[in-house]
Amino acid sequence: MRKLLFVALLLGIQLADKPAFAKKKQPQGQQLQLQEIFASGKFGQRSVYGVNSMKNGSQYASIVYGQQPAILIYNYATGEVADTLLKTEWLVPRDSSKSIRFAGYQLSADEKLVLLSTAPEQIYRYSSREHNFVYDRASRSLRALSPNGKQAFAQFSPDGSRVAFMRDNNLFVVNLANYTEEQITFDGKNNEIINGGTDWVYEEEFGFTRAFFWSPDSKKLLYYKFDEREVPQFVMPIYDNLYPTNYTFKYPKAGEKNAVVSMHLYDLTNKVHTRISTGDNTDQYIARAGWTNDANTAWMQRVNRHQNKVELMFINATTASTRVVLTETSEQWVDIHDDLTFLADGNHFVWSSERSGYNHLYLYRMNGELVRALTEGAYEVTNFYGLDEKNQRIYYATAYPTAMERTIYSRAVSGGDALKLSPNRGKNSANFSADFSHYLLYHTDANNPQTVTLHAGDGKQLRLLQDNAELKKTLAAYNLSPKEFIEVDNGSGTRLNGYMIKPANFNPKKKYPVLMFVYGGPGSQTVDASFGQYYMWFQYLAQQGYVVVSVDNRGTGYRGAAFKKSTYLQLGKYEVEDQIAVAKYLGSLSYVNKDKIGIFGWSYGGYMSSLAITKGADVFKAAVAVAPVINWRYYDSIYTERYMRTPQENAAGYDDNSPSSHADKLKGAYLLIHGTADDNVHFQNALVMNDKLVNANKQFEFMAYTDKNHGIGGGVTRLQLFTKITNFLEKELK
């Protein structure tokens, strides 16, 4: 095997300012405690919340939290409070003497009304139902949207005269002139038909929940209908009763039947439903839908089941006919995105594509003719903020100058040099005003918490909004170790990005145990210029004498399509080879105890750590797997088939790199953790792995969290969980 290179880069300096907690001579600081990390909120970063640009472009609204939350309107230019949108004390419904507590808000297009959500009740990861109230700014009156039960996905019409929502799998519209409620679909039924909302797998994998869309003239609704009657039903026991109950929902696993999705138009004037033609093939996806700026033209993205062909289609809202405008194909898969913007001129739209090998922005005519590339180069565009048509400039974020960073740019539509709008290296994101004359810039780096600044459209900083000074002061009291960026050659010539946190008061003559943190799934990233996940716990481990390392293997994101798609049809194979290669090299370092290398991961990372401790049994001493996929046959159709096709087509790809297929190879210590009410990665995965290990006569540890979902949280659960993991590492790696 080619000798591995381990290069400590100047990136540690380039991607991060000097740590807020750094001193020339670091005395012994306070010692971190698990309780304060996982149960106190002591190290939480502050930000600027609930920001929405007002339509005038010169002001923005923002939620100010406190005992009595309020929404204030600020001037971009001066930073002064221009108005109070609302105060909690004003929010007293006409039939109550107590004010409501809002969880979120939405402004009508004319900004005269505010839709407030209260008492949210989570359904799945992103979906919820809540009670909604309409607040009239002029009269300061508050009225419940509907007295007939909680609503989901409530949305103003563009003219602000109505609100549409879903309840019990049916669509409703409330006329705000008199608060009359009209039910517009009637066939909705749990586990059978859904109107206007997504099913479980669309929500999880396509990332949207509201499946209805107002036409620009507020006269029509475009909506999805999911027929999930033929989808296999998953039964999940709930144990919080004397006799456990079963929660049942439709969950299509790899290779199984999906819901049949159809698209419909509802005309509010004539009360007529029209079905849209989506083609003869029903075994497909409608991954996105909406309206152009034309009230007679809607759009949708049709995707084949293999997800290697995406068609942008326009819908004639009068005839319900469709036509294909643009087609994207790939030998592997095409990523679904939200980078679709229709210009006010009615003749163009902006679309992103990986056609060059990297994700970039392109300008098209409405007939699908390519005008020009708006960005180009060996880097990824990660976010498209929009196009200022008045000044003919686009605004976007890139993974540049390194894949670990995010930099904000503006560029003329006609081309030329890009204007950098984020002055500091690290991880940047932006929130632009409606007219792009101002923006809020959110910046962090590997060793410093978030800073929020306000800028003019040309990049000039106008003021500091949040610097997390209190958190920096808190961090300075501890003897924390800087996150250092590294590169590792995987042994076959591919350099992998990583980071390392060395023990506090590091002594290069000592031998330290190592904990590797992994996720590693397609298009993901754990190594970036931010604090990152589990930062304070990793600092705790460093204080306890561990070297903490994370490396992004092949298949992860922001390095181009070839790198990301190299794992196609063989999830786990190259990823775990890379993690094993990294562990072997770490074991060769003078300050690492090669017999004390462990690995930890959650979800896809749990899959990776389970694979590492079996296929890499001679390298890893211990592994912690939280909520792992054990065989991709047990996971959902959309995600799994995107990267693996179906089990019927690719049986070896599914089984050859499943931890359950390698249980007999286990040598080291293995801690398997799962929530029994995990609707995402089912508890079934843990039970299958349990069975395989028992049958192989392997000793291991198993921890189940009763009625907990994929996140395993609530109350002191996270504290208990990470105490369990920490104690396990102490026993096995020290």
Image (cartoon, grey):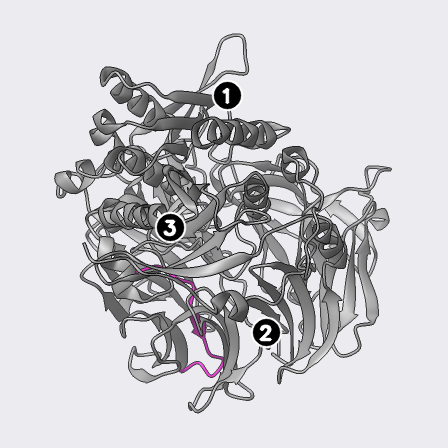
Using a 10 Å C-alpha cutoff, classify the residue at mark 3 as few (fewer than 14 neighbours), some (14 to 19) or many (20 or more).
few
User: Which residue bears the numbered disc 1?
Assistant: 706
- Residue 645, position in %: x, y? 20, 47
What is the secondary structure assignment of the residue under circle 2? loop
- Residue 391, position in %: x, y? 55, 89
Using a 10 Å C-alpha cutoff, classify the residue at mark 1 as few (fewer than 14 neighbours), some (14 to 19) or many (20 or more).
some
User: Which residue bears the numbered disc 2?
Assistant: 424
In front: label 3 or label 2: 3
- Which of the two labelled residues, at mark 3 and mark 2, occupies the earlier sequence position? 2
Please give the label number shown on residue 39: none
Foreground pick, 243 / 41: 41
In front: label 3 or label 1: 3
Foreground pick, 526 / 370: 526
Foreground pick, 55 / 133: 55
Residue at left offset 78%, top offset 48%: 142
User: Which residue bears the numbered disc 3?
Assistant: 589
- Which of the two labelled residues, at mark 1 and mark 2, occupies the earlier sequence position? 2
Instruction: Give the Cα distance between marks 3 and 1.
Output: 41 Å
For residue 341: magenta? yes
- The answer to which quarter of the image holds residue 461 is bottom right
What is the secondary structure assignment of the residue under circle 3? loop
3 left or right, relative to 593: left
Residue at left offset 36%, top offset 49%: 586
